[in-house]
Image (spheres, grey):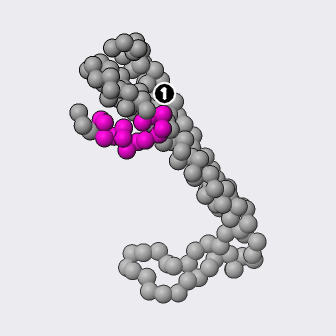
């Protein structure tokens, strides 16, 4: 096992810390999206009261809400565009966190089992954010 000097207990401790922070980040992002939605609804519209709802006609299945929907104003539209534009960055952030945690855990497990080639594969997959490869490595065991 030359070139590798890993303390599995230390890695496990760090992964627990990272997992806790990832959970906090998930809660913060969820709250942020909820707050943006509330802000969009509270921003109102640029149309007079009775026109603030768009009535759509057509059959409605029993137990379903009517097809009308509230009109959105320019602020709500801008917030929607902002969130849509940020989705790739948010997804990439999530995937990088998953890859780092999953890659470290898989690499350490392979190291403990003495399979340095699989450990290197896990490390490389984490570096290149290949969640599919990491899941395959974990599933092969």
Q: Is residue 62 above or below residue 111?
A: below
Q: How far across and down, in percent of the image, does residue 127 sit?
A: 48, 33
Quadrant the N terminus occupies:
top left
Q: Nearer the viewer, residue 123 or 18?
A: 123
Q: Tell me which secondary structure the magenta stretch mostly adopts.
A: helix
Q: How far across and down, in percent of the image, does residue 82 sit?
A: 67, 56
Q: How far across and down, in percent of the image, does residue 94 sit?
A: 50, 42
- The answer to which quarter of the image holds residue 12 is top left
Give yes or no for residue 84 being in the magenta stretch: no
**Residue 21 visible, this angle:** yes
Quadrant the C terminus occupies:
top left
Give yes or no for residue 127 being in the magenta stretch: yes
Q: Judging from the image, what secondary structure is the residue with disc 1 in? A: helix
Residue at 57 percent across and 51 percent down: it is 88
Neighbour class for label 1 at 10 Å: few (<14), some, many (≥20)? some
Q: Nearer the viewer, residue 52 or 141?
A: 141
Q: Nearer the viewer, residue 73 or 22?
A: 22
- The answer to which quarter of the image holds residue 103 is top left
Q: Find the magenta span and give its range.
A: 125-138
Q: Is residue 73 above or below residue 90?
A: below
- Relative side of 51 to 127, left or right: right
Residue at 48 percent across and 27 percent down: it is 18
Residue at 44 percent across and 86 percent down: it is 59
**Residue 98 visible, this angle:** no
Residue at 58 percent across and 52 percent down: it is 87
């Amino acid at each position: 096992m030359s070139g590798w000097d890993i303390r599995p207990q230390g890695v496990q401790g760090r992964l627990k810390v990272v997992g806790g922070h990832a959970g906090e980040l998930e809660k913060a992002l969820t709250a942020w999206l909820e707050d943006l939605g509330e802000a969009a609804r509270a921003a109102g519209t640029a149309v007079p009261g009775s026109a603030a709802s768009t009535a759509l006609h057509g059959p409605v299945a029993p137990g379903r809400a009517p097809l009308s929907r509230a009109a959105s104003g320019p602020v709500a539209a801008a917030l929607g565009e902002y969130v849509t534009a940020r989705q790739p960055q948010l997804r990439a952030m999530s995937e990088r966190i998953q890859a780092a945690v999953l890659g470290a855990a898989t690499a350490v497990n392979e190291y403990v089992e003495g399979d340095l080639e699989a450990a290197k594969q896990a490390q490389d997959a984490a570096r290149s954010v290949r969640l599919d490869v990491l899941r395959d490595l974990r599933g092969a065991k």
